[in-house]
Amino acid sequence: MNKINVLIFVESRYRINRKRIKATVDRVIDKNGVESSVEVSVAVVGDRKMRALSKKYKGEDKTRNILSFSQTEGEPINSPNDTLRLGDIILSFPEVIKDASRDEMLVDDKVDELVEHGLMHLLGIHHEE
C-alpha cells in the first residue's frame, strides 16, 4: 500500500480543515493510480505572501488563488525510501474566500477544488476540464 504524506502549513489566522485537505490529496492520488509513496505540501497564506511568490516565481505583481511548484522540474531529486516528492501547493486564503463567494460554494469545497487542481499539475496533468 502506498503511503501518502501531506505536509500542511497554515498561517495562524486562517481556519482550514486539515483532515479534508489530506482526504482530497488521498482521493486524487488514488484516482490517478499512483502506486508509490508520495509526499506533497500544502500551504495556506495571505495575499501579501502570495503576491510576493507570484512576483518572484511568475514575474507577475499580482495575487492569485493558487501556485504549485513541482519537485520533478529541473534536476532529479534522489529521495530516501523511494518516496515521490511531488512538490508544493500554495493557496491564498483571501482569494479562496473570494472565489468561493463568486462561485457560490462553501470555502472548504473551493479549497478541495484548488488542492485537486494543484495536485493534478504536480502529477503532470494539465487543465483537462
Image (cartoon, rainbow, N blue to C red):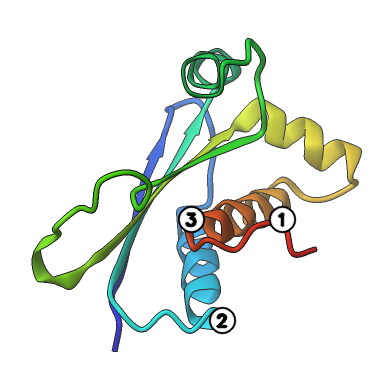
> Mark 2 or 3, which is nearer the eye?
3
Amino acid type shown at disc 1: Asp
Residue 60 versus residue 15 in the image, above or below: above
Q: Earlier in the sequence, mark 1 or mark 3?
A: 1
- Foreground: 21 or 127? 127
The answer to whether 23 appears left or right of 100 in the picture is left
Looking at the image, do the residues carrying marks 2 and 3 touch, with CB atoms under 8 Å apart? no
The residue identified by callout 3 is 122
The local crowd at label 3, few if under 14, some if 14 to 19, many if 20 or more residues have their Cα within 10 Å, is: many
Compute the Cα span from label 2 to label 3.
14 Å
> Which residue is at the far bottom?
1
Q: Where is mark 2, residue-wise?
A: 31
Crowd around label 1: few <14 · some 14–19 · many ≥20 (10 Å):
few
Q: Of helix, strand and loop, which one carries label 2?
A: helix
Q: Position of residue 95 (x, y in %)?
A: 70, 29
Residue 31, above or below 23: below
In the foreground, 95 or 72: 72
Of badges 1 and 3, the one in the foreground is 3
How many marks do you count on the picture?
Answer: 3
| Residue 109, numbered circle | 1
Secondary element at image label 3 = helix
Residue lying at 55% horizontally and 71% vertically, measured from the top left: 28
Residue at the image point whose x is 45% and y is 63% from the top: 22
Outermost residue to the front: 75
The quarter in which the N terminus is drawn is: bottom left
Question: Mark 2 is on which residue type?
Answer: Lys
- Position of 83 compared to 33: left or right? left
Marks 2 and 1: CB-CB under 8 Å?
no
Asked which secondary structure carries label 1, the reply is helix
Query: Label 1, label 3: how many angstroms apart (C-alpha)?
Result: 20 Å
